[in-house]
Image (cartoon, rainbow, N blue to C red):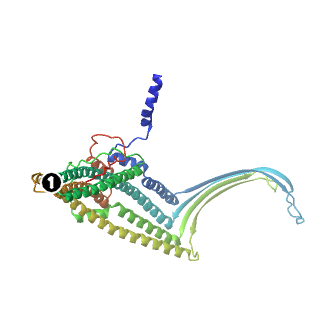
Amino acid sequence: MLRKRLSLALVPVWLACTAAPALAANLKDIFQAARLHDMGYRQAGASYREARTIGPEARAAFLPHVTAQANTSYNDLTSKILGGAPGGFVFPSGHFTFNSHGYGISVTETLLDIRALYAWHAASATMRAARQHYALAKSNLILTVSAQYFAFLLARDDLRLRRAEERALKAEYQSALRSFHLGRAPITDANEARARYEAVYAAALAARNAVRLARARIERTTGRPAYHLWPLNLHHPLPRPRAGALITDEAQALRDNLVLQAARTEARAASETAHAVSAGRYPTITAEAGYSYSRADNGEFGFGTALRDKTIGLDLTLPIYQGGELSAESARASATAFHAHVAALRVERRVQFDVRQAFLNVRNGYHEIAALAAAKKAARVALASERLGMRVGVRNNVDVLRAEQTYYRSRRDFARAIYDYLLGRLELKAAISHLTAGDIGRLNALLEPPSAVRAPNSGRRLPRRVLRP
């Protein structure tokens, strides 16, 4: 009986151990899980593997083509000669059965094919563009995962500050209500405190929902539950902006930006394809060599044969007129190449603007953090002064409420500025060149393990109490 009770008691433990594991991880672990689950990144890898087969296929036009063949057959032949000239050669008639067999080999080598040469160049450019798109997909995944991770941390910090502000305003409301009952304060102070409390309570509900949505986005990207994520150490020294001028960053972006490189490579591939189509009017020269042997033991003439054939020669092909098909195909390919060239120019201008925008955002964000840190400190001092003034009678409850909300708003703005600055650095690096796993490692160094791991939940329920004056 005791063994049965122990078995029943261990069932919840076994269910908890076999359940889906929660992703208690940092940014690097989140990125590794996203690489295995994100379909956009996996599709880019599949496209790259598919594009890698284009090069060997185009290069095959310049390599020898060797063909071997062999045959054997059993022949059952009945021959009957009708008529015939008098005194001429009389062909034998009758029934013949015999075996025949043969084999041969032929080699074809392209000596001149300008169209195939341009097609090979176009295939090489296509493979290079696919490789760049694959690296770009990894860079975009790093940026996406980092943005989702920071959005979750920001939403969680916002919820924590909203709850702290809610508790503070609730205490102020209760204090104003007691002062009103004691006759030391008007009812307007209590009503003002209640209105501010209700507004903060609604904001806390919205913040809790924002945490749920941010966690759901991470889970959709990784395919795993996302709980107990490492928080950002807000007291850790932040990396300074990149030492460099805007002109230098723009010049580097025009050289190293992956989006621009892929667009230019695609334009190059389209141009090579247009040249290949236009080269269809040029002659092609191929060399051919072959050897064949055939043997028949008998035949309709009453005797067998053994034949050996050796050939070697050149083949010249010159297209003269195809009904205008070549001209139309060449015009369409030229238009496609021009469109790809214009698209590359458009990407170049967009990259220049993105670099300028990201550069200015990073520089402004770094100085904004310092300003908001000073504002947060000033708001804390102002709140302490307002509370002291209320105790000595020179400030009222409304002044304290305003100071408290200003203080918590400054803390939220400070945290948001830090996350925006770190994400802006990634966006600047992505605009200049591309992101790598090293960027994830540097961001991961700014995180710290959670001090305590709590059971996973979608956000604690906010208690709703009716406040009555």
Quadrant of image for the C terminus:
bottom left
Say what amino acid the circle numbered 1 marks.
Arg
Please name the residue shown 43% across and 34% down the image.
Answer: 12
Q: Quick one: 97 or 428, which is closer to the camera?
A: 428
Write down the quadrant of residue 289 in the picture: bottom right
Q: Is residue 239 above or below residue 270?
A: above
Residue 421 at least partly seen: no
Percent coordinates x, y for residue 129 in the rendering: 41, 60
**242 on left or right of 4:** left
Please name the residue shown 62% across and 59% down the image.
Answer: 311
Percent coordinates x, y for residue 155 in the rendering: 31, 53
Q: Secondary structure at mark 1?
A: loop
Please name the residue shown 26% across and 58% down the image.
Answer: 195
Percent coordinates x, y for residue 136 in the rendering: 37, 57
Q: Is residue 222 above or below residue 114?
A: above
Crowding at label 1, few (<14), some or many (≥20) Cα neighbours within 10 Å?
few
**80 on left or right of 330:** right
- The residue singled out by tag 1 in the image is 184
* Count of residue discs: 1
Q: Quick one: 368 or 85, which is closer to the camera?
A: 368
Q: Quick one: 160 or 115, which is closer to the camera?
A: 160
Percent coordinates x, y for residue 167 in the rendering: 24, 49
Residue 224 at least partly seen: yes
Write down the quadrant of residue 262 in the picture: bottom left
